[in-house]
Amino acid sequence: MIHQYKLNGYNIVLDVCSGAVHAVDEIAYDIIALFENNDKNFVVSEIAKKYPELSNSEIEECYNQVLSLKQNGQLFTEDTFENMAGELKQKTAGVIKALCLHIAHTCNLNCSYCFASQGHYQGERAVMSFEVGKRALDFLIENSGTRRNLEVDFFGGEPLMNFQVVKDLVKYARSIEKEHNKNFRFTLTTNGVLIDDDVIDFCNKEMSNVVLSLDGRKEVHDRFRVDYNNKGSYDKIVPKFKKLVQARGNKNYYMRGTFTHHNPDFLEDIKAMLDLGFTELSMEPVVTKKGEPSELTDEDLPVVLKQYEDLAKLMLKKDKENKPFTFYHYMIDLTEGPCIYKRISGCGSGTEYMAVTPWGDLYPCHQFVGDEKFKLGDIFNGVNNKKIIDEFLSCNVYARKDCKDCWAKLYCSGGCAANAYHATGKITGVYDYGCKLFKKRMECAIMVQVTRILGDE
C-alpha cells in the first residue's frame, strides 16, 4: 500500500508497510500512481502522452528505478502484520506501566467544554486521600512485572487543589523506588490558577513534564476557561506560566490548548503562544457531546485542515529564523519510530495504562472515568472486569475494519479508543472526524521532516 500527496512543493510517496518515504519529481510521481495496476508498456505510453518532451528510454529508466524500489522493499510492500495483531498486548497482559491519578475530582474553573464535567466526571466532587494514592502506587509496583520505568500523571479536575497529597505521594514513591528497582516518572496537568513559587520549585525538582492549559488568544481562552464568577482566567495564569516555564529552562513542558467551533483558525492561537515566549505547544480538537455549541462542524473542517498546513509552513519558517518550536502532533521520527508491535497494538489504555479515581476505582483511561460499565476493578482488590479487559486486549488496528485499507494505520495505531466509543458506541469503531484531522497532521508532519532532511527549508 502506498499513499501519494503533494504539499509545500513536494511530491511525497509513503510506502505504508515499510515506512519508506520518497520525495520524487512529477514523472516518478505519475509513474508510481500507474505502476501497481498496469503493465510497463501501458505506463510508458501514458507518461509519454503527458510528457511529450521525454523519450521512451528516459521514461523506461524512471520506470525501472521505481521497479527497483519495489524489489528492494521500499515501494508497494505487502502488509504482513495482521497475524501479529494483539501479540504484544497478550504477552504483556496484566503488566501495568502507567497510572493516571485523579488526585482531584474538583476544579476551580468552570469550563463549559470540559469533557470531565468541570472536573467531577458526572459524579461527586472529591479529592484523593494520601492513603488511596499510596495504595495506588503500591498497586502499580505490584502489577508492573519486570518494567523498571513507571509513569504517574497527576490529573483532575485540578490537581493543585490537592497539592499537599501530590507532594506526599511523590515523596513516598521516591522512598520505595530503589527498594523495588523501579524509577518513577511524574507529570502534572494544571490550569495554572494555583501555581506559586512552591509549586514551581516542586515541579522543577520532581515533574518530568508539566502540561499547562492555555487556549491561545486571550479572547479565545477566556470564552471557555472561566471561574465560577464567569471571569476569564487568562490574565491570572499567563504570568504564572511564564515564570514556571522560565524556571524550567524553557523545556519539559507543554502548553496544551483546545480549539473549538469558535476558533477553527487555531493557528492564530499558536502564534499568540509563540508571542508569549512559549515554544513547546499542543492544540487539541475539542472532545464534546454531539450538538454542543463548541463541537467542530463539517463547515469547520476545511478551515482546520488548512490551519495544519499553514502551521507546518510556519514551523519551517521559524526553523530558518533559528526560532524553532515544537508542535506535539508533528513529532515524528522517520528512522527510528515505535516498533511494529507497538504500531499495530495501539493505545495501552485498559491494559498497560489505567486511571484511578479518588476512591481507588480503576478505569481504562481518564475519558472512561464515571462510566460504570468500564470500571475495571479497584486498587484494593485488583482488576476483575474480565469482559472489558478482554475487549481492550483485543483492541488493535486490525480489529477496526475501517482501518484495514487506511494509509495512516501504522501511525495512529487505530486511534483513541475513547473517542471511537463516544462516536460509535464501540472501542473498535472509528471516529471519522478525528481520522480526517489525524491524516492531515501526518501528511504535514512527514512533509516537515522531508524538508528538514533535504535541507530545503
Image: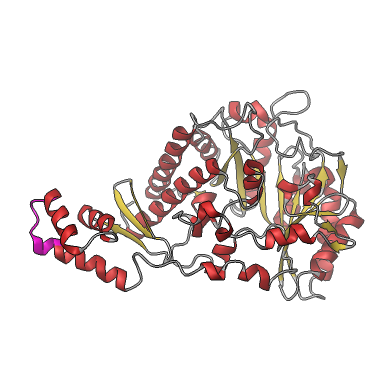
Place residue 213 in its image quadrant.
top right
User: Could you tell me if residue 99 is visible in this image?
Assistant: no
Q: Nearer the viewer, residue 99 or 291?
A: 291
Please state the horizontal and vertical placement of residue 263, each as a whole percent of the image. Answer: 54, 30
- The residue positioned 15% from the left and 59% from the top of the image is 44
- The residue positioned 63% from the left and 28% from the top of the image is 291
Please state the horizontal and vertical placement of residue 185, each as a whole percent of the image. Answer: 71, 62
Place residue 87 in its image quadrant.
bottom right
Q: Which of 15 and 86 is in front in this view?
A: 86
User: Could you tell me if residue 303 is visible in this image?
Assistant: yes
- The residue positioned 75% from the left and 57% from the top of the image is 388
Q: Is residue 54 magenta?
A: yes
Residue 289 horizontal side relative to residue 261, left or right = right
Q: Does the magenta stretch include residue 66?
A: no
Please state the horizontal and vertical placement of residue 425, each as a whole percent of the image. Answer: 67, 44
Exactly how many numbered labels are in the figure? Answer: 0
Q: Is residue 93 above or below residue 288?
A: below
Judging from the image, the colouring scheme is: secondary structure
- Region in magenta: 51-59
Quarter occupied by the N terminus: bottom left
Residue 121 horizontal side relative to residue 79, left or right = right
Residue 333 horizontal side relative to residue 165, left or right = left
Q: In this view, does 158 lie above or below 89?
A: above
Please state the horizontal and vertical placement of residue 84, each as a whole percent of the image. Answer: 56, 70
